[in-house]
Amino acid sequence: MPVTPFELFLSDEVQSLLDNFASLLDIRVTFYSADGRMLRRGRQMSNTDYCRLIQAEPHNLRRCVELDADKQKEAMRKRGIIDYQCHAGLREAIAPVHIHDQLAGYLMIGQFRISNSPPACILERCDSPERRKALTEAFNALPRISVEKLENVLGLFKMLIDYIVVRELAVLQGDRLRTDIDRYLEQHCTEDIRLPEMARKLGRSVSTISQFLRRNYQTSFKELLLERRLQRAEAFWQANPNATVGEAAFAAGFSDQFYFSRVFRRRRGLPPGQYRDRRRRQTANSGGAGTVE
């Protein structure tokens, strides 16, 4: 399975949704990462007794692992829900979760049954009447979903996935979003931009970007925008050492020169005019571009 280079962030609401889904249908539902790690599970439902009995035989456990891996690949390839029956007669369904066309993980439901008894091939391999009885009882203890209702269950499963994605309860945090934010601010920091506008352009929600900025930059959109504008002013003076404070403020996107001066002094520790003059002296003394210490 491909490993996503991004960190997957799951809202606490995801756990509540999985718990409710599992309680409603009495079916285990699990959220896996793109590399196969279990991230969340509804009601923390463990493996069924029937599965434990089947997987007690090493070759059966290997078949289970291989089948799940194959179905994950198939679901990713088809970009949809794959409903299948395992060799032991249980039904499962798995679906990829894509966020902005990036594979974020998988949701899986199961196991449940649609028949009234284990497959004959399973029972025929039992080495004792006791094991045969134990397997049959464990199988019948599993939730049964009729063939007629299976389509409705899969429909609810799809709605669960769509809700998680649309509500951005699962979001990818990492290099891609950071790059998108940096690129957008680089291109538009001198304009009169607002967070909702940037979120819309990047295809994210306001809350997603706000959380990302707090988590990765320890700041807000407003403060980050101010910092980028100050950097733009510094770059402007590097290219135009004789420019006035007003010209630098305008070039950096500030409509108010006095506000620019207050922000610059608060963040850089000296008035912008002094910063410009110090840079100009350093440039003259070094015979090239200098930096302000």
Image (cartoon, grey):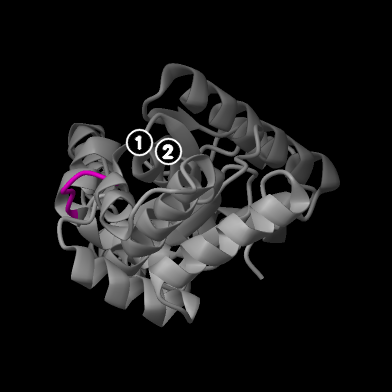
Give residue 207's position: percent from left, percent from top.
25, 62
Where residue 85 is drawn, which disc sits there?
none
Q: Secondary structure at mark 1?
A: helix
**Mark 1 = which residue?**
187
Three-letter residue code for mark 2: Arg
The answer to whether 254 is drawn above or below residue 90 in the figure is below
Where residue 183 is drawn, which disc sits there?
2
**Residue stretch rendered in magenta on the structure:** 190-194
Three-letter residue code for mark 1: Gln
Q: Is residue 284 left or right of residue 136?
A: right
| Residue 110 appearing in the image | no
Q: Secondary structure at mark 2?
A: helix
Q: Residue at x 56, y 47 (%)?
A: 6
Magenta segment, principal secondary structure?
loop
State the quadrant of the C terminus. Answer: bottom right
- Which residue appears farthest toward the top when viewing the image? 78
Q: Are marks 1 and 2 in contact (CB under 8 Å)?
A: yes
10 Å crowding of disc 2: few (<14), some (14-19), many (20+): few
Give residue 121's position: percent from left, percent from top.
65, 31
Q: Is residue 270 part of the magenta span, yes or no?
A: no
10 Å crowding of disc 1: few (<14), some (14-19), many (20+): few
Asked whether 272 or 121 is in front, the reply is 272
In this view, the mark in front (1 or 2): 1
Q: Residue at x 46, y 73 (%)?
A: 218
